[in-house]
Image (tube, grey):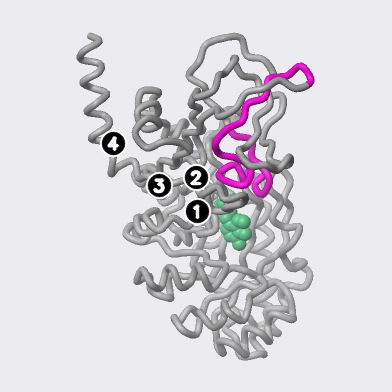
């Protein structure tokens, strides 16, 4: 089994950072981002990676991926312009939002982005008018059983309509080049990928019969990160997908749009208990980061975060709330936790995807600062070594 735990700060470093920089604080490891990218490429060597920037748009993370040769899945004018300003060439972006805005198209014209996805007839004329001749992939709807987040509720054409929609795109002057799908986020089973690949093969064959030679398949994102309850060898999962891709699509250009897999394990949150109370017989802990901040993933990503207290003691069901004045701002109920006190720090690993990306400044709380681990670690680990030497 390949590495399972991801990037995780030690207790000593957490305490030192909390003292030095204050809390809440996010720590991003660019080396972890790189390791995740390399793991994906190792098992899926035929795939061109288009990192889904929505998962975490931190520009230092994006820069590391760009330097590694990654391309990008973008969903808005803001993402397109951020990459263009960084010097990322337009052919390294796919505007993979099935419903595109006028400002998005304007950014495409300004920067030269001309690869799109779509899933319905009304989008065809929009694309043909905005960027004539653009290369387009049709997103098909597929089974999402087993996905942590279902991404086919909102998007995806019926496979029965696929060939017709691609022919219409071609008739409108577009380069109807292929298909894409998304099995759903944090997919913990390989089966939906295999089913989707076989369906795509069938549709490629149907398109050929209708006189359309498709040349690109985008297998989307959804690849999982390790979590305490994930019983899956992720390397094996990727290798199985790779084998099926190679068997079914030996001559096709293959793209993928991973988000969470690349950045999910690369960020740790350090947060602190700022208030303690008891309600209905249960301890309540108020933290300095909340649902409107890094824990926005509880709502938007339906994610349950692991909280590491660095404290011994009998764990009892506890409630965790954020710092705002809003009563919605409650992250977890009945989470087993040893007794905590004001000023205790908690480490929250796996905070890289769909966390800071959707944080707000509601109630005047600033977004949590993000430090890059590789820029600070030498100094901190030096301190740790000195401490260990004194203790030893
Ligand atoms: C079009 C598209 N591509 C890629 C992704 C990334 O998915 P994940 O983070 O599960 O890899 C998403 C997620 O919402 C998406 O909508």
Picture quadrant where residue 59 is located: bottom left
Whether residues under marks 3 and 1 lie with C-beta atoms below 8 angstroms apart, the answer is no
Mark nearer the viewer, 3 or 2: 2
Name the mark nearer the viewer: 4 or 3: 4
Q: Which residue corresponds to mark 2?
A: 352
- Name the N-terminal-most of marks 2 and 4: 2
- Find disc 3 in the rendering and name its residue: 33
**The C terminus: image quadrant:** top left
Nearest-to-viewer mark from 2 and 4? 4
In the image, what residue occupies the spot 74% across and 46% down?
145
Of 307 and 44, which appears nearest the observer?
A: 307
Which of the marked residues, 3 or 1, is nearer the chain's N terminus? 3
Real-space Cα distance between discs 4 and 1? 22 Å
Up-down: is 343 above or below 204? above
Which corner quadrant of the figure contains ligand 1?
A: bottom right
What x and y, as percent, mark residue 248? 57, 59
CB contact under 8 Å: marks 1 and 2: yes
State which tag comes first along the sequence, 3 or 2: 3
Name the secondary structure under disc 4.
helix
Which of the 4 image quarters holds residue 316? top right
Q: In whole angstroms, how far apart are the C-alphas of marks 4 and 3?
A: 16 Å
Res. 56 mark:
1
Circles 4 and 1, Cβ within 8 Å, touching? The answer is no
Which region shows up in magenta? Answer: 280-305
Q: Residue 89 carries which label?
A: none
CA separation in Å, label 2 and label 4: 18 Å
Mark sitting earlier along the chain (1/2): 1
> Tag 2's secondary structure?
loop
- Mark 4 vs mark 1: which is more N-terminal? 1
């Amino acid at each position: 089994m390949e590495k399972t735990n991801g990037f995780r700060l030690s207790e000593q470093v957490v305490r030192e950072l909390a003292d030095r920089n204050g809390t809440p604080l996010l720590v991003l490891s660019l080396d972890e981002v790189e390791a995740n990218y390399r793991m994906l490429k190792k098992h899926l060597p035929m795939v061109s990676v288009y990192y889904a920037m929505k998962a975490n748009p931190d520009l230092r993370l994006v820069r590391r991926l760009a330097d590694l040769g990654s391309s990008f899945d973008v969903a808005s004018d803001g993402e397109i312009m951020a990459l263009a300003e960084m010097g990322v060439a337009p052919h390294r972006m796919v505007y993979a939002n099935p419903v595109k805005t006028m400002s998005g198209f304007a950014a495409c014209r300004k920067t030269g982005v001309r690869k799109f996805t779509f899933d319905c007839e009304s989008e065809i004329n929009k694309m043909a008018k905005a960027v004539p001749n653009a290369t387009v992939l049709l997103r098909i709807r597929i089974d999402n059983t087993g996905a942590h987040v279902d991404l086919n509720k909102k998007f995806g054409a019926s496979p029965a309509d696929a060939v017709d929609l691609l022919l219409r795109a071609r008739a409108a002057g577009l380069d109807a080049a292929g298909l894409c799908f998304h099995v759903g986020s944090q997919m913990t089973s390989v089966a939906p990928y295999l089913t989707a690949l076989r369906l795509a093969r069938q549709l490629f064959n149907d398109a050929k019969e209708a006189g359309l030679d498709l040349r690109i398949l985008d297998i989307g994102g959804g690849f999982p990160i390790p979590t305490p309850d994930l019983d899956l060898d992720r390397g094996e999962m990727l290798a199985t997908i790779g084998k099926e891709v190679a068997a079914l699509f030996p001559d096709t250009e293959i793209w993928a749009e991973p988000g969470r897999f690349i950045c999910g394990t690369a960020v740790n949150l350090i947060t602190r208990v700022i208030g303690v109370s008891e309600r209905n017989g249960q301890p309540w802990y108020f933290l300095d980061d909340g649902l409107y901040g890094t824990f926005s993933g509880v709502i938007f990503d339906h994610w349950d975060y692991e909280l590491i207290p660095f404290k011994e003691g009998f764990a009892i069901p506890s409630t965790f709330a954020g710092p705002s004045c809003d009563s919605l701002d409650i992250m977890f109920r009945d989470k087993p936790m040893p007794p905590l006190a004001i000023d205790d720090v908690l480490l929250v690993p796996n905070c890289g995807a769909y966390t800071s990306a959707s944080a707000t400044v509601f109630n005047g709380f600033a977004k949590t600062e993000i430090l890059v681990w590789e820029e600070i670690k030498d100094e901190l680990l030096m301190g740790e070594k000195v401490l260990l030497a004194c203790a030893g």
